[in-house]
Image (tube, coloured by chain):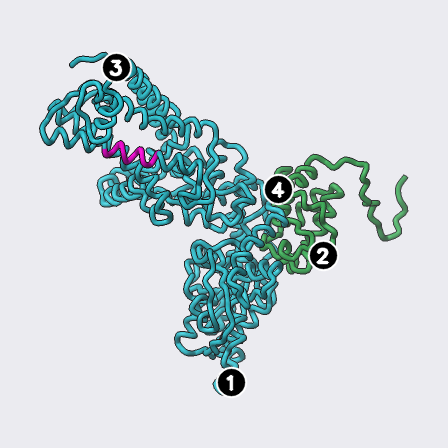
Amino acid sequence: MSRPDFGFSWSGARALDPSQPLSSEVQKVLDGEPGLLDCISCGQCAAVCTAGAYTSMSFYRVVLHLLRGETKEASMMSHGCMLCGKCRMTCPRGVNIHNAVMLISALMHTKA
Amino acid sequence: MERSAVFVIPFMAGFVFALTVLAVRYLWWLRGLRKQAPGKLPAVLFSHKTLSAINEIFNEAILHRRILKRNRRMGFMHMSLAVGWGMMILGGKFETWFHTGRFFHDTWYAVFFRYFEPQVVGGLAGAFWLHYMDLGLLVVLSGVTLAVIKRIKKKVLGIKNTTRHSRVNRLALTFLWLVFPLRLLAEAVTFGQYGGGGFLTGTLGKLCFTSPMCAVVELPLWWAYSLVLGAFFVVLPFSRYLHIPTEMVLILLRHWGLRASTELKPEEGLQAFEVHACSACGMCLDVCPAIGQQPFQAAYFMQAIRSGKGWEKMATDCLSCGACENACPVNIGIENMRVAARGKVHQDYMAKHDYLPTLSTRERRSANILLFTGCMGRLKPGITEAVKQLLEEAGLSWVHLDEKDSICCGRPMALAGRTDQAATMRAANEALIGSYRAGMLVTTCPICLNQFRNEYKLNIPVVHHSELLWQLMSEGRIKTETGLECFSYHDPCELGRKGGHYNEPRELLSACGNLLPVDREKSESLCCGNTPGSLSLSLKDRQNITAATLKVLEAPHPDKIVTACPLCQHNLSRQSKVPVKDIAEVLAGVLISTSTQAHYTHEAETIEA
């Protein structure tokens, strides 16, 4: 049955289901940077981001994508990072964003 | 007199084995060398470079001058082992030549010469060689004694940490320690039985081993000496003692112009020689800001690289402050190797910076100074403001390059081992800098400073703001009031050890107040606990490093801790009880303003069509 066209669309439900195990590649990133689980999505990282001035990069959203299993989005977004490290300096949770970005960016590379 | 020479077989077997393994390993490491430098090598073999290499080999591999300079007792330990053993090898050759009139003998003949010729007489010259060989033995034994003391009580040798060795290295160490006491005993017994001998072996023989009963132990002792020496040679190519021959070859290859690869190749080229020239002497341990907290000191990193296990975390955890490389007596390119290792860990890492603005050089504006404050400057606007105030005071015009949009210089990417990924960033910054006509590029961030100097092709000098400010002060263009405030200064690793600027900030601070001496400064300075180099070290571990550094900086009770790097300033101030300021902020605080002379040249930038 085809959906009626109302001239707009909406996204599907993207809530996290904790009962679902994380995919192996997400787990590998989390093993490499366990600090990612400390992220509280406060947005400090996005506020200071050098790449964020030019692109849609914001690290807390990268984390959200990753935890939802949307590795492609997470990886694509982090490709623009310049590794300047301001986010790591300001992160109130001490997430090692440097390391996380390198691991997450590599996800797409290995897939391609 | 003819005596059975069967006991030399273990020594000879071990010796030949070591030589064979060494030859095979060296040839394997040197493979592909001809591709690197086709036709160049023969010319360089017979040049002054070889002579200067031999000079360095004598100074470092034999005399160990770099260790001596750092710690005399440790230096003496290493020197006595090398010099004493060298004396004995050289003396053995001359002694057998002198006594037999022939220069060439079987290798074992000189090693066990006393057993075969216990009663040589040769007048004064013969006596000279006897005492000379004993002196060599005594020198080595003094080194072995110090080495044993070092294992029991490190403090005696003036060190706090000594390397923990792997099993094969402990085995090799035991053999090495046994070789020389056994030689002493074997020679003493022989001289006790047959008379003669030098001041050490002869005297010991006369005192202890003249009884005919001792004849029974003579041959077993020579057997033991031969066995232990042979065993040492067998483990040598697989233990840290491989550094003995490898360091010499490394020095030669370096002087001949070979450079280590920027990729991690621990079994190929100069890097292989570097990895295996590390003697795990432990000079890198005490200087490491993370010693006692983290296990990634250079000696252990090299160990991990050699074994191929566990190097990844050691490479990505380390903060790349460069203290170990500075202290390394073999001058191993540790930083380069760590960066190469990080590149290997993150070989799949991919960046895409095609979004960066491409700047077309429409206009070339002029100013005295191009100011680049970098990413860190954006986070610490106070430092930038202070620098601008000082420039204004000096009457200099400037353009703040990254006032609105900043593009990273690329150094963090390089420290993460992926210099190749930073090309777009470098190009964008180069275009930006090139679109101005200026006398110099001034940066407030030492991280950017090194990147601009080493990786960029710029046609203007790049200086750190502390350099410029010191120049302005010595020219009298900025004047400060010397107050009573006390400062302790933290040398940023990128400005000090990597940039070589220790004096400018100190001169500036002395003009502002009292500069207090701290325990670890200049090339020995500690780490603020946060560099772009460390990728995987957790915040808590980094905070522990910061705490240890602050303890040293706070020790002389300063009113302010001063540094010259926005990253250090940010990181230290997070945990410090004492205010932490950048050198420019301190200077701006005590500036004697000559407002009558001040003029806004900033606005007066000439715009050329």
Would you say residue B117 sits in the magenta stretch? no
Asked if badge 1 and badge 4 are on a common chain, one would say no
Q: Is residue B451 visible?
A: no
Check disc 1 and report the residue beneath it. Answer: B595
Tell me the SS state at disc 2: loop
Tell me the SS state at disc 3: helix
Q: Residue at x 37, y 35 (%)?
A: B243
Check disc 3 and report the residue beneath it. Answer: B215
**In the foreground, A47 or B32:** A47
Query: Badge 4 local density, few (<14 within 10 Å), some, or many (20+)?
Result: many
- Badge 1: chain ID: B
- Badge 3: chain ID: B
Query: Color of chain B here?
Result: cyan
Q: Residue at x 66, y 39 (%)?
A: A31
The residue stretch that appears in magenta: B135-144
Labelled pair 3, 2 in contact (Cβ < 8 Å): no
Query: Color of chain A here?
Result: green
Could you tell me how far apart the alpha carbons at marks 1 and 2 are, in whole angstroms? 43 Å
Q: Amino acid at mark 3?
A: Ala
Could you tell me how far apart the alpha carbons at marks 1 and 3 are, in whole angstroms? 96 Å
Residue B60: x and y in percent read: 31, 42
- Badge 2: chain ID: A
Check disc 2 and report the residue beneath it. Answer: A43
Per the rendering, the mark at residue A106 is: 4
Query: Badge 1 local density, few (<14 within 10 Å), some, or many (20+)?
Result: few
- Badge 4: chain ID: A
Could you tell me how far apart the alpha carbons at marks 4 and 2 are, in whole angstroms? 23 Å
* Outermost bottom residue: B596
Residue B453: x and y in percent read: 44, 58
Q: Amino acid at mark 4?
A: Ala
